[in-house]
Structures are given as structure tokens and as C-alpha cells.
Amino acid sequence: MIKASGIKAFYGGSSKTKTYLADLKQVAKLSGKNYAEVLQEMMAQISESIAELHPADTAKTEEASEEQTITDPHKMAATSSPLLNPAPAPTVRPKERTSSINIGASDLNPPEVQRYVVEHIVKSEDTAMHARSHHRLRVFSGKVPRPQHEVDYDTWRSAADLIMKDPAISEIQRSRLILDSLLPPASDIVKHLSHDLSADVYIKQLDSAYGTVQDGEELYAKFMDTLQDAGEKPSTYLQRLQVALSLAVSRGGVPGGDVKKHLLNQFCRGCWDNTLISELQLKQKKSSPPPFPELLLLLRTEEDREAAKVQRMKQHLGSTKQKVSSQAQFAYEEEEKGMCAALTTLTKQLTQQMAAIQQQLSALTAIQSQGQQSCAPRSSPATQPRVKPKSSASSTVSPKPGFCFRCGEDGHIKPQCVNPPNSALVSKKRKQFNEKKQRWQKQTSSSEQLN
């Protein structure tokens, strides 16, 4: 009954046990030791205290055995001579002996308590190992250009801020995590610092070397100049705005209480999708702007709704739309063909007109030359000496072809010809030109002999 009552009292005091374990966890956090190590030390102390209690129990059992040996002769004497010692042996000490025997090591440290403590130690060790692996920072060296397996300083700084704000990590572990994540030349900046300093000192030292040096006002001006790029989704544009605004807030360019207002105003100013802004009524929300997560969720929901609507339209109107587009394409092709045919006809007409003008010009030139030749024999003898210099001057000039070597027409040359080739006319004109040239050569030779 005493043992059962002890176990019942233990389970009734489980809240005290949990409070005691919570105190041990707080002690481990303040001392910088592992929680499992602290529990093991406490278990060792409990074992020592139990060992100190065991000698008393053994002493009591020895006394009880001695009492038994002392009382046995009385019993033997009573059996041998009941008249000499008729009174029975006192039974007070056996009662004390039974009470001392019932309080043993199993009552002071029952198996349920041992199993509970061992399971808690194993779980705490697993949790500690998981916490150490989970809180490990990524590598940062500060090299330029940045290696592929490393992160930039802003990303590393964000992860370090989470570690600095985690109450489950001691100050020594924070400094150790920061130092383990650094490689040269970044580690050289904090190498000369003492190891007993807090993690804030290491962060300030690294901020002075790799942190943002722009002023808060410059970052705010950069935030105001951030506009939506071509083909960029509104939700992606809002995320870029949030990053730029966070930098401005961290440098003191924007008050922390005005973040939502500035974010919504700049989004309405820099987003080119006026339909989205009007559907979500974002301009009407400037008096009470929503926070960034809520605004981002609104934009992504609207984008997903529009994409689903376009997809449904393509699936439902795919064949009809294809027929309409094919008909429209046929209409455009007919119109373009008609325009091309009209331009081709106009070009041919202009070419024919130019050819007719050239023929008329060549005919007029030939008539003028024939008129001059026919007027020369009819002139009076008095005027013949005056004509001689002209004939001599004209005879000194070699005749020119005056026709195209491609089509045979007069008035243009081959590089400027747009007419189809006419080899028969070209050969005819070439024959006439050769005859004309021979006559000129004969006239020139006869005039030279007369002179």
C-alpha cells in the first residue's frame, strides 16, 4: 500500500516535475551548456543522493536481523522451559522493522521515473542536434565576384537576424554560428576580435565592411523610381517594391509606421495595369492601406483568376476562334493582293509612258539632225564657207550609240533600264550604229585629205 501510494503521489506531482525540468532548461540556456548535459549532471546527483540513502536502509536491515537473532534464543527457551520465561518477546521493534523495510530504492526512484527521464534525455538530444543543424548559417566570404555556392551579404544578414532574435539559442552559440559561417576575407575582419564578445559586435563589424552605405533618403528616392518593367507581373513588382522599401526603412529613410501607405501609393503610381487597380479599388484603400501580405494575396488571386479565365476561353472558343482568324487572314491576303496588283499595273503604265516619251524624244532628235543635213546642200555658196566650220566641228565628234544595250530603246542606258530585254532590236540598232560610225570615219578621212 505504501508503494502504490508513492507512485500515485508521483503522478499527482507531475506538474512539479515539469516545472523542475523547465527550470533546468532555463539554467542550461543561461549557462550556455547543452540541456542533455545538465540533465545528466542532475541524474548523477540524484544517484549520489540515493547511494547515500542506501547505507541507512542496510543498517536498518542489519539491526532487524540482529534483533531476530536475539529473539530466537528466547523463543527456544520458551519452548524448552515455558515456566522460566512464560512472557512472549516484545513485538515493538518488528513493527519498526517492517516500516523501514518498505521504504526502499524502488520507492525513491521507481522505474516509471527512470524511463521518463531517459526518454526525455534522448528526445532533448535529438532536438538539440536538430536545432544545431537547423540554425546553421550559409557560407559568406565577401569575395567579388561571388561564388555560386555562397549567398550575398543581405541574405546572410537576414538569416543572422533570425538567429539573433531566437531566444532558444545562447549567446555563445550565436557567436559560434556566425564565426563558423565566415570564410576569408570576411573572417579576417572579425579574426582580431575577442571570442568572449557578443554576437552584436561581430554583426556591427561586418556591417561596416559589407553593409549598405547609401543614405536613407537616397534609398527612398530609389524606391520612388522603381517602376513596373515590361512583361512583369503586378505581384512580382510589389515584391520588388517591398524589398526596396525595407532597405529604406532600415536606413531611416522612411518611418516604420508609414510603410503600408508608401507601399500602396508607389504601387498605384508605378503599376501600368489600370484595370487591375480599378477592379481591386486600390486607390480607394489609400486611407486605410492593407499590409503587404494581404495586398500580395489580393494581386496573386486576381492574376490567377484572369489566367484561369483566359485558359477557359481558349478551351471553349479554340476552334471558333481559329476559323474566324483564318477568314480574317484570307480577307487581308485578298486586300494585299489587290493593292499589289494595282501597284504593279501603275508601275507598268508609268514604264510604258516613259518609254513612249523616250521614243518621241529620240524621234525629234533624229528629225532635227536630218533637217540640218538636208538644209546644208540647199544653202547658197556664200553661206557654204560658214557651214564648213560647223560640219568640220560636227565631223570631229565621234557618234554615240544613243540606245540601250538591253531593250534597244533610245534615251537611256542599260543600268537604268526597267524594260524586258530585246536582243533583236539591240542587234539592229548596233548594226545601224556601226554603219553610221563607218560613214563618219570616211568623212573624217576625206576632210583630212582635203586639208
Image (cartoon, rainbow, N blue to C red):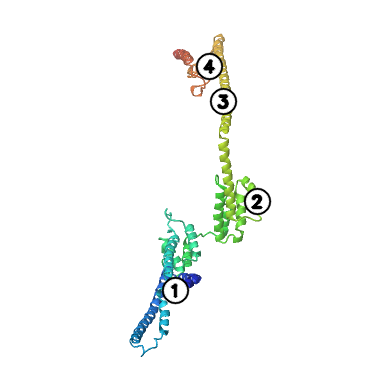
- Residue type for callout 4: Lys
The residue nearer to you, when weighing 227 against 260, is 260
**Picture coordinates of residue 262, whole percent (x, y):** 61, 56
Do we see residue 378 in this rendering? Answer: yes
Residue density around tag 4, few if under 14, some if 14–19, many if 20 or more, within 10 Å: few
Residue density around tag 3, few if under 14, some if 14–19, many if 20 or more, within 10 Å: few
Q: Which circle, 1 or 4, is nearer the viewer?
A: 1
**Picture coordinates of residue 163, whole percent (x, y):** 48, 63
> Which comes before the other along the chain, label 1 or label 4?
1
Q: Secondary structure at mark 2?
A: helix
* In the image, residue 70 above or below residue 112: below
The disc label shown at residue 283, or none:
2
- Residue under numbered circle 3: 337
The disc label shown at residue 95, or none:
none
- Say if mark 1 contacts mark 4, CB within 8 Å: no
* In the image, residue 275 above or below residue 26: above
Residue density around tag 1, few if under 14, some if 14–19, many if 20 or more, within 10 Å: some
- Residue under numbered circle 4: 390
* In the image, residue 91 above or below residue 197: below
Q: How far separated are the C-alphas under marks 1 and 3?
A: 108 Å
Query: Is residue 280 left or right of 236 when viewed as pictured?
Result: right
- Residue under numbered circle 1: 3
Q: How far separated are the C-alphas under marks 4 and 2?
A: 93 Å
Q: Which circle, 4 or 2, is nearer the viewer?
A: 2
- Residue type for callout 3: Lys
- Tell me what residue is drawn at x 45 percent, y 75 percent: 2
> Which comes before the other along the chain, label 3 or label 4?
3
